[in-house]
């Protein structure tokens, strides 16, 4: 079986976790929680990093600390994982669904302005499968209408965006807040985990405070809670794994980029297959290598998924559009032509760090033959 995307554990994970077990520092306090935040902040290039129990809670926290709530609208793509949308609803706001680009599969920035209303409070670009959203025009638009930008960078850790001054920025650091996930299928994993990053010191302080039950410890060690907080804390045990995983991140990104290049080489001439592009201003971490099965290919995307499964190759169709699902049908949408089309035609191919060129040869051969 060639899996879609599995964790890679080849560093200091055992050593650091063992240290937590040996010293009894297994819960939400401990040196690895601070170290993971410190190291992550350095890697990503943000002023603050606050670790959370998963990516969904990081997004929830982001919306909360920006004061987004009932009566507010957040513009977000429909072709994403449902965890981009649910936190908007948890805080009492409403998602407004925007279309995506045909070539990069991410939010079409040109279609955002027409959806802005008096209720719009924030835009949530999602760097789906690893390619960055075109952030510079998006930030200009946000400034024009005084809107917050929360980057859902959960699938794009390590991807980069170049602004017109030629400076490269890691995604997640361009908007007001960026959120990451360390779920088991992500580039680096802590089993389950997330991170909120921001360059605004005050927002960072607030995020830490609210994510740790908004707890104030008095002189006599008693607790008081001036606000209603959350328990979004990551245990030291998992943060220890995060520190070990982060030590390997550059190596993993290089492997994934090399694998994507090899996939491209083998698939670019296949009629009816559209390979992923990388814009001049983008560096894609290729979290999931993703192609589009065009009509000219001869068989439908779902038939190809079946053939791949018969050959013990795990693939995944692009996300179903959220706006078509029962709990989300009531929310406003732009014209979602590309979303609907790509959701029918897109497929993610195996993308683990442990994937070999021989695996890719085998996968490409089946795609060519099919
Ligand atoms: C686009 C997107 N947003 C949010 C999340 C939520 O992350 P988590 O599963 O860590 O809660 C995920 C990943 O699972 C995701 O793919």
Image (cartoon, rainbow, N blue to C red):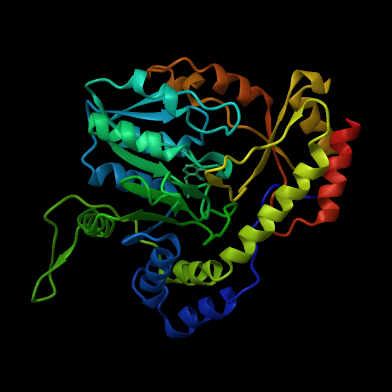
Question: How far across and down, in percent of the image, does residue 262 sit?
Answer: 77, 49
Q: Nearer the viewer, residue 147 or 208?
A: 147
In the image, residue 248 sits, relative to residue 315, either above or below, namely below
Q: Quadrant of the C terminus?
A: top right
Q: Nearer the viewer, residue 275 or 192?
A: 275
Q: Quadrant for residue 293, please give it.
A: top right
Question: How far across and down, in percent of the image, does residue 212 sit?
Answer: 27, 60
Question: How far across and down, in percent of the image, does residue 104 sit?
Answer: 58, 34
Question: How far across and down, in percent of the image, does residue 357 sit?
Answer: 82, 55
Q: Residue at x 25, y 43 (%)?
A: 64
Q: Quadrant for residue 53, please give it.
A: bottom left
Q: Residue at x 43, y 46 (%)?
A: 163
In the image, residue 122 sits, relative to residue 162, either above or below, namely above
In the image, residue 337 sits, relative to residue 144, either above or below, namely above
Residue 190 visible? The answer is yes
Q: Residue at x 52, y 78 (%)?
A: 16
Q: Tell me if 170 is positioned left or right of 264 in this view.
A: left
Q: Residue at x 22, y 33 (%)?
A: 146
């Amino acid at each position: 079986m060639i899996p879609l995307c599995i964790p890679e554990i080849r560093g200091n994970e055992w050593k650091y976790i063992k240290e937590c077990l040996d010293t009894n520092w297994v819960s939400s306090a401990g040196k690895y929680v601070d170290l993971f935040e410190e190291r992550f902040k350095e890697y990503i290039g943000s002023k603050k990093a606050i670790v959370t129990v998963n990516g969904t809670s990081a997004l929830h926290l982001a919306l909360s600390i920006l004061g987004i709530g009932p009566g507010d609208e957040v513009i977000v793509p429909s072709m994403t994982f449902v965890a981009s949308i649910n936190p908007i609803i948890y805080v009492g706001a409403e998602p407004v669904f925007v279309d995506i680009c045909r070539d990069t599969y991410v939010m079409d920035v040109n279609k955002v302005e027409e959806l802005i209303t008096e209720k719009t409070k924030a835009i949530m670009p999602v760097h789906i499968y690893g390619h960055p959203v075109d952030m510079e025009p998006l930030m200009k638009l946000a400034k024009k209408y005084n809107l917050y930008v929360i980057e859902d960078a959960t699938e794009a850790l390590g991807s980069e965006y170049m602004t017109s001054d030629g400076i490269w920025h890691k995604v997640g650091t361009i908007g007001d807040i960026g959120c990451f996930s360390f779920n088991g299928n992500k580039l680096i994993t802590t089993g389950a985990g997330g991170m909120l990053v921001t360059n605004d010191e005050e927002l960072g302080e607030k995020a830490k405070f609210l994510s740790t039950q908004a707890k104030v410890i008095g002189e006599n060690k008693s607790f008081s809670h001036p606000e209603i907080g959350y328990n979004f804390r990551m245990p030291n045990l998992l943060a220890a794994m995060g520190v070990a995983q982060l030590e390997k991140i550059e190596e993993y990104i290089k492997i994934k980029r090399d694998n994507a290049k090899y996939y491209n080489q083998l698939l670019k001439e296949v009629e009816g297959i559209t390979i992923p592009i990388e814009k001049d201003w983008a560096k894609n971490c290729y979290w999931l290598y993703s192609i589009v099965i065009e009509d000219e290919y001869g068989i439908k995307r779902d038939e190809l998924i079946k053939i791949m499964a018969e050959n013990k190759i795990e693939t995944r169709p692009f996300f179903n559009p959220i706006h078509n699902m029962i709990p989300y049908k009531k929310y406003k949408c732009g014209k979602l032509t590309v979303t609907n089309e790509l959701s029918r035609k897109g497929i993610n191919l195996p993308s683990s760090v442990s994937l070999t060129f021989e695996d890719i040869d085998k996968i490409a051969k089946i795609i060519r033959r099919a």
